[in-house]
């Protein structure tokens, strides 16, 4: 007998899941076998009970193929329940997936990287838009599920790997190469993904410097992360090296907020969509070495409360830093949070000799 966990779906007399009065329920494990009804067989699987029904689209609007019940049914088919460690919060509103795909302007013939396809709700919209999708999924069960769901289309390649560890540049280059050699146009690929919040920084750090293969990266992130990456302003304590990094490699844009009630299970925070338009390598600000540039930026912020003429003393003398700042058009007493990405580039080129 299969002892894998299942999801028991109660379809009757269920409260709506998206109203504030009826917060979306969470999956909860039933009592373990030793607490179950006397006489129950020992091999009874651990049931997960979900007490909710989805809001259905009516009045001529199309039905969401990835609503609450469909998501649970898909998980149940593999005996799965959402895993917190994998950031598994599934999107229930296909209109938000439509907006994600529209934000990246995905169209016929595009090649798209999706990180964490899960049950395939976003993958479905991407495929319907005419894209060929490379999906990286860490959870082997979800990788199988999404392969089975779209295997027939010929528009999906699934890699069961951890995105953080995989060689995404070479995977994507070889996919683009094979599409090109089949006679199709060789446009840049795009990234569209509802990613697990715990790998957001890794994803941004890996993908943004890949302007040679990607033109846009559209990510559904934790709202706070989205603000931190896009709307941290000069002279505030939120302004960090990551902002210099993001602006060096891309033009970021905050697109829209996604309330937490749209996910199952519901996370503790809201989300938001950010679009990064990647710069091509020829458009990067001119520095002799990106390694020494970001190392200088990090050093500058390490001494956050210090003036640059102190925190960058390991590179050159305070008076050399003061005159370089003057050259950049900044006061000799400048602190890191007062410099734009362009200012840092100019400062680097004046003080770092290689
Ligand atoms: C937030 S869910 C999104 C699922 C689906 N895209 C959706 O919108 O409903 C994140 C997905 O990423 C997968 N995942 C988590 N960590 C991953 C990693 N390091 N590499 C690749 N996939 C990962 C999870 O298994 C899960 O399917």
Image (tube, helix red, strand yellow):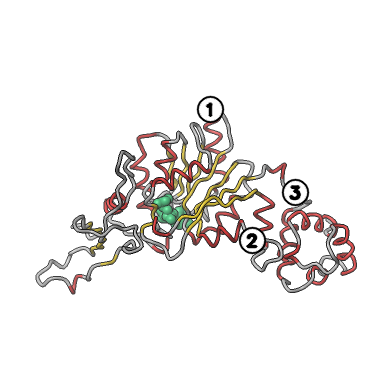
- Quote the CA–CA distance across marks 2 and 1: 40 Å
x, y percentage for residue 72? 29, 54
Within-10-Å neighbours for mark 2: few <14, some 14–19, many 20+:
some
x, y percentage for residue 3? 22, 60
Residue identifier under label 2: 232
Residue 136 is at least partly visible in this image: yes
Name the mark nearer the viewer: 2 or 1.
Answer: 2
Residue 76 to residue 240: above or below? above
The residue most toward the top is: 183
Q: What residue is at 58 percent from the left and 44 percent from the top?
A: 216
x, y percentage for residue 77? 27, 51
**Along the horizontal axis of the image, is 339 left or right of 212?**
right
Task: Tell me which image quadrant ligand 1 sits in.
Answer: bottom left
Q: What residue is at 42 percent from the left and 37 percent from the top?
A: 127
Residue identifier under label 1: 184
Q: Quadrant of residue 27?
A: bottom left
Residue identifier under label 3: 285
Q: Nearer the viewer, residue 5 or 349?
A: 349
Instruction: Report whether the residue tagged 3 is closer than 8 Å to ligand 1.
Output: no
């Amino acid at each position: 007998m299969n002892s894998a966990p299942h999801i028991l779906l109660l379809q009757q007399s269920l409260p709506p899941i998206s109203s504030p009065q009826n917060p979306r329920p969470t999956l909860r494990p039933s009592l373990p076998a030793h607490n179950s009804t006397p006489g129950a067989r020992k091999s009874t699987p651990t049931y997960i009970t979900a007490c909710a029904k989805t809001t259905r689209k009516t009045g001529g609007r199309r039905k969401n193929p990835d609503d609450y019940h469909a998501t649970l049914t898909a998980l149940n088919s593999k005996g799965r329940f959402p895993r917190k460690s994998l950031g598994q919060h599934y999107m229930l509103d296909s209109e938000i997936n439509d907006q994600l795909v529209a934000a990246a302007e995905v169209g016929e013939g595009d090649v798209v990287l999706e990180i964490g396809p899960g049950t395939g709700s976003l993958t479905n919209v991407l495929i319907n838009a005419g894209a060929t999708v490379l999906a990286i999924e860490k959870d082997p069960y979800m990788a199988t599920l999404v392969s089975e769901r779209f295997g027939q289309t010929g528009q999906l390649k699934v890699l069961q790997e951890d995105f953080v560890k995989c060689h995404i540049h070479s995977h994507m280059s070889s996919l683009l190469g094979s599409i090109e050699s089949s006679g199709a146009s060789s446009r840049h690929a795009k990234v569209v993904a509802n990613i697990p919040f715990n790998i957001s920084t890794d994803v941004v750090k890996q993908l943004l410097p890949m302007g040679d293969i990607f033109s846009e990266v559209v990510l559904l992130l934790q709202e706070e992360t989205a603000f931190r990456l896009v709307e941290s302003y000069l002279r505030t304590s939120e302004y960090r090296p990551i902002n210099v990094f993001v602006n060096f490699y891309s033009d970021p844009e905050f697109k829209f907020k996604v309330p937490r009630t749209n996910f199952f299970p519901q996370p503790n925070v809201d989300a938001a969509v950010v679009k990064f338009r990647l710069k091509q390598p020829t458009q990067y600000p001119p520095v002799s070495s990106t390694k020494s540039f970001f190392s200088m930026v990090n050093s500058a912020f390490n001494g956050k409360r210090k003036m640059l003429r102190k925190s960058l003393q390991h590179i050159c003398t305070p008076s050399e830093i003061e005159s370089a700042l003057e050259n950049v058009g900044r006061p000799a007493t400048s602190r890191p949070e007062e410099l734009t990405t362009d200012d840092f580039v100019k400062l680097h080129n004046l003080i770092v000799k290689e």
